[in-house]
Image (cartoon, rainbow, N blue to C red):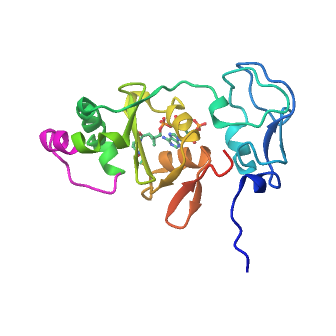
């Protein structure tokens, strides 16, 4: 049997999301102004729900394929630097984040500093010190300081992130947030890929 390989040509055959009416910066994607059509140059149709109602960050012309980076930004992501260890440690080992993480060992600040000096490249800071997202070989972890939760920040970060995530049973906030941002349940983990980005 022939193996089906995704290719640029293959993209012509699949559907993806396109803008079908001009949208002005600050307006939202609605059922009226987007449509799933061929070819597959935009994001995949399965993310339609995730982007409906989201504001766009620039004028978009009818006929443009929809890309994740068109969505409004409340979040600035920056690459972590070694000295971010204090912020990451304080969030990562806070009581409620510990409750929702796989590893239950509390690591001291000194130990963490050493570890982070080797691992910091896996981290990005959310609005400098409000939280972080980590990508460890494709596995995503995200956490925010308590006072910045519930403002849509993680949703925005996750809309623009792909990978896998393992979420502990009972962590409703995280589960809802990942699913709302386009991740789908695959057995014991969640996954999203940007095949058609
Ligand atoms: C999980 C977490 C990252 C969510 O971040 P957040 O920025 O507060 O989430 P958002 O404001 O972007 O919310 C997006 C969606 O997530 C869901 N959600 C967020 N908080 C929720 C809560 N407390 N209960 C239920 N659903 C929740 C909702 O569907 C929400 O969409 P809505 O506001 O339109 O209803 C944050 O709660 C956190 O840092 N928790 C501790 C660390 C953790 O558990 N990380 C996940 C392990 S990978």
Q: In the orientation shown, which residue stands out farthest toward the bottom?
A: 1
Would residue 99 be counted in the magenta stretch? Answer: no
Q: Is residue 102 above or below residue 69?
A: below
Q: Position of residue 37 (x, y in %)?
A: 85, 46
Q: Position of residue 162 (x, y in %)?
A: 54, 48
Query: Which image quarter is the C terminus in?
Result: top right
Query: Which image quarter is the N terminus in?
Result: bottom right
Residue 26 shown left or right of residue 109 in the figure: right
**Res 36 quadrant in image:** top right
Residue beneath the point at 80% across and 38% down: 18
Residue placed most toward the observer, 30 or 149: 30
Stretch in magenta: 101-115
Q: Is residue 110 above or below residue 60?
A: below
Q: Is residue 1 above or below residue 45?
A: below
Q: In the orientation shown, which residue stands out farthest toward the left?
A: 110
Q: Position of residue 81 (x, y in %)?
A: 30, 31
Q: Position of residue 97 (x, y in %)?
A: 33, 44
Residue beneath the point at 49% across and 65% down: 188
* Total numbered labels placed on residues in the image: 0
Would residue 111 be counted in the magenta stretch? Answer: yes
Residue beneath the point at 62% across and 47% down: 182
**Res 167 quadrant in image:** bottom left
Residue beneath the point at 55% across and 37% down: 155
Residue 51 shown left or right of residue 158 in the figure: right
């Amino acid at each position: 049997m022939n193996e089906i390989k995704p290719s640029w040509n293959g993209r012509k055959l699949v559907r993806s999301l396109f803008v079908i009416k001009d949208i002005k910066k600050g307006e939202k994607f609605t059922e009226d102004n987007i449509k799933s059509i061929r070819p597959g140059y935009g994001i995949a149709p399965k993310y339609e729900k995730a982007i409906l109602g989201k504001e766009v960050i620039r004028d978009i012309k009818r006929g443009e394929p929809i890309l994740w980076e068109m969505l409004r930004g409340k979040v600035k992501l920056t690459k972590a630097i070694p000295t971010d260890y204090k912020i990451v440690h304080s969030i990562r080992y806070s009581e409620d984040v510990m409750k929702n993480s796989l590893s239950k060992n509390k690591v001291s600040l000194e130990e963490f500093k050493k570890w982070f000096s080797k691992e910091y490249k896996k981290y990005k800071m959310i609005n400098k010190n409000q939280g972080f997202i980590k990508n460890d070989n494709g596995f995503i972890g995200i956490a925010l300081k308590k006072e910045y939760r519930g403002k849509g920040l993680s949703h925005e970060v996750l809309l623009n992130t792909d990978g896998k995530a393992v979420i502990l049973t009972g962590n409703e906030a995280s589960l809802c947030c990942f699913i709302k941002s386009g991740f789908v349940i695959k057995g014991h983990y969640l996954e999203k890929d940007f095949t058609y980005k």
